[in-house]
Image (tube, rainbow, N blue to C red):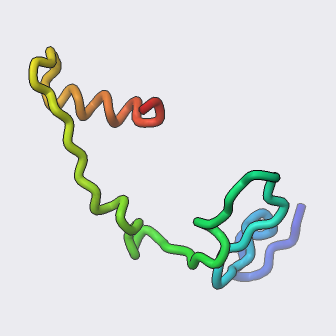
Amino acid sequence: MEERTRGQRSDAANWAKPVRTLSTRDVPAGAIDANVTGRRLQGAASGFGRLSQKTFWVRLAGARVKPTQAIDIRTTRFGEF
């Protein structure tokens, strides 16, 4: 068993080291890292940028689904859209 120093997590070796900006390495051919390299980390307290401010509209005219059902479907199956 690993000896634990005061204030250090027992799994500290498995976590990424602190950095000021993000960078990539071993990028596959054809991949673009334009949204990663040089970016600063953002925590939940800082918000998630434009995503947290987006408003989505869904036209339900003629649909046989209630608005609450549409929201439930979008929430549970978001990855499929």
Q: Position of residue 3 (x, y in %)?
A: 86, 71
Exactly how many numbered labels are in the figure? 0
Question: Which quadrant holds the N terminus?
Answer: bottom right
Q: Residue at x 14, y 27 (%)?
A: 60
Residue that protrudes farthest toward the front in the picture: 30
In the rendering, at what x and y percent does residue 50 appear?
A: 35, 65
Check the image and name the residue furthest to the top.
64
Relative to 59, residue 12 above or below: below
> Does 31 appear above or below 20?
above
Quarter occupied by residue 77: top left
Nearest the camera: 32 or 17? 32
| In the foreground, 78 or 2 | 78
Q: Position of residue 2 (x, y in %)?
A: 88, 66
Residue 17 picture quarter: bottom right
Q: Residue at x 71, y 71 (%)?
A: 9
- Residue furthest out toward the right: 1
Q: Where on the picture, by quarter, is residue 63?
A: top left
Q: Is residue 36 left or right of residue 12?
A: left
Relative placement, left or right, of 15 versus 60 is right
Q: Is residue 72 left or right of residue 36?
A: left
The structure residue drawn at horizontal position 42% and vertical position 32%, both measured from the top left corner, is: 81
Query: Percent from the top left, x then y, of residue 5?
Result: 79, 80
**Residue positioned most to the left:** 61
